[in-house]
Every structure is written in C-alpha cells, then in structure tokens.
Amino acid sequence: DVKVTQSSRYLVKRTGEKVFLECVQDMDHENMFWYRQDPGLGLRLIYFSYDVKMKEKGDIPEGYSVSREKKERFSLILESASTNQTSMYLCASSPSGQSEAFFGQGTRLTVV
Amino acid sequence: GESVGLHLPTLSVQEGDNSIINCAYSNSASDYFIWYKQESGKGPQFIIDIRSNMDKRQGQRVTVLLNKTVKHLSLQIAATQPGDSAVYFCAERTGGYQKVTFGIGTKLQVIP
C-alpha cells in the first residue's frame, strides 16, 4: 500500500516561530502537494512539486515556502508563523500521469 | 451541491437510498475530474475519476457524471450505507504540471 507519512499529527507553535512540516512518501511518486484545510473552505493548494528541486505555487503560497531535496520528501516551511496559519495541513503524492493522489493523515497546527 | 461560503453543504440520506452529490467546476482546461471521500480524522481518499472527454463513468456502487456544457460534475452513490457518511470533495486536475484543486466539500449524513 502507498504510504504518505506526515511527521506530526499535532503541533503547537508560537507566533513568529519558523515551522517545518515534513512529509515522506514511499512509492517513488513524482508529484507531491501541500494543502491546508479549513472549515467551509475545503482544501486549498499551497505548493506542489513535480520533480526533485522543482516547485510551483498553488493558490495560497503567501507566508509559506517548500523544499524538495529528495524525491520522497516534501517539506512545508512557515517562515514566521502567524495565527491565521492555524489549520489542518495535508500532504499528498501522486505518480506522474495519474489523477489519483494519496494523502497523509494531516497535521493539525495551532499557532498561539 | 457546493457553494462558496463558510457553511459546509450537507446532504442527509436514508440508508438504502441513492445519494447524488453535486459540484460546479470552473476551469474548462481541466483534463480530469476526481471525487474524494474524507472520513473524520483521516486524509481524503480517492473514489473515482473521469477524463474530460467522457460524460459518464461507473465504479463499484458509484457513478460520476460530467456535463461540460454547464461545468457540472456529480457523484451518485447507489444503496447508500452508514459507512458512506463522510465529506465528499470534487477536484479538478489541470494538465501540464498536474495541479489538482479541490471544491469546498459536501457532508453526507446517512440516516439508519
């Protein structure tokens, strides 16, 4: 089975902290995605990557950056966490050419 | 169906009845349309997809209909079961870098 693992299930960080959310997939997928999920707003795409060291902005990239140094790992970075970044963060991966994406269990981030 | 706003649309269905979940999409250039199911506390899970050059696709107990004229997508679930209770998201994939964007979701409640 495909496995997408997010490093933390719950995180509490302070305003202004630099935050790293890590995601690892074990199926050699080319594409990886970071979404945030908020009530009533669905899943909104922050960044995605279609290859190592490649990244593309999604719909809401402001306040975030990403890193993909290895194919299996896609990191989301909050340079200076703010309270409006309190959310559920979901990582996903998919093989090139296929529409099915596999999601991790999510990281619930609270910024205080 | 889905709409912009802070309230998640909810569909309540009697167990054993058929469910129809609707979605409006915006991008005529999308090449795939996808349905995901998200159970409480889990990441979204792929259900079925349909290519943009098709108008109907059937899976096990599910059927997806695509009407490109009015940019409308629907998911039909036959003989709805309690285990179908979840939030359902439609998503569209834009070719090239395979960016996938999601709708806000519809909550399906199955009444035993």
Image (spheres, coloured by chain):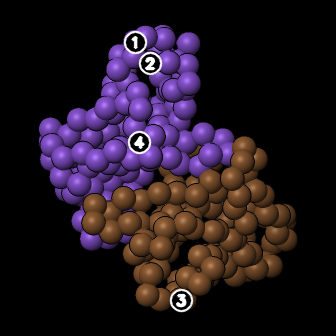
Chain colours: A purple, B brown
- Which mark is drawn over residue B22? none
Instruction: Of the two numbered discs 1 and 4 on the same chain, state the one appearing first in sequence.
Output: 1
| A89 lies above or below A84 | below
Q: Position of residue A76 (x, y in %)?
A: 33, 33
Q: Residues within 10 Å of mark 2 (few under 14, many from 20)?
A: many
* Residue on which disc 3 sits: B55
Mark 1 on the same chain as mark 4: yes
Residue flagged by tag 1: what amino acid is it?
Answer: Glu
**B33 left or right, relative to B4:** left
Q: CA distance from mark 4 to mark 3?
A: 30 Å
Q: Chain of mark 4?
A: A
Q: Position of residue A16 (x, y in %)?
A: 43, 11
Q: Chain of mark 2?
A: A
* Residue on which disc 2 sits: A81
Q: CA distance from mark 2 to mark 4?
A: 15 Å
Q: Position of residue B38 (x, y in %)?
A: 58, 55
**A3 left or right, relative to A29:** right
Q: CA distance from mark 1 to mark 2?
A: 5 Å
Residue flagged by tag 2: what amino acid is it?
Answer: Ala
Q: Mark 2 falls on what kind of element?
A: loop
* Residue on which disc 1 sits: A17
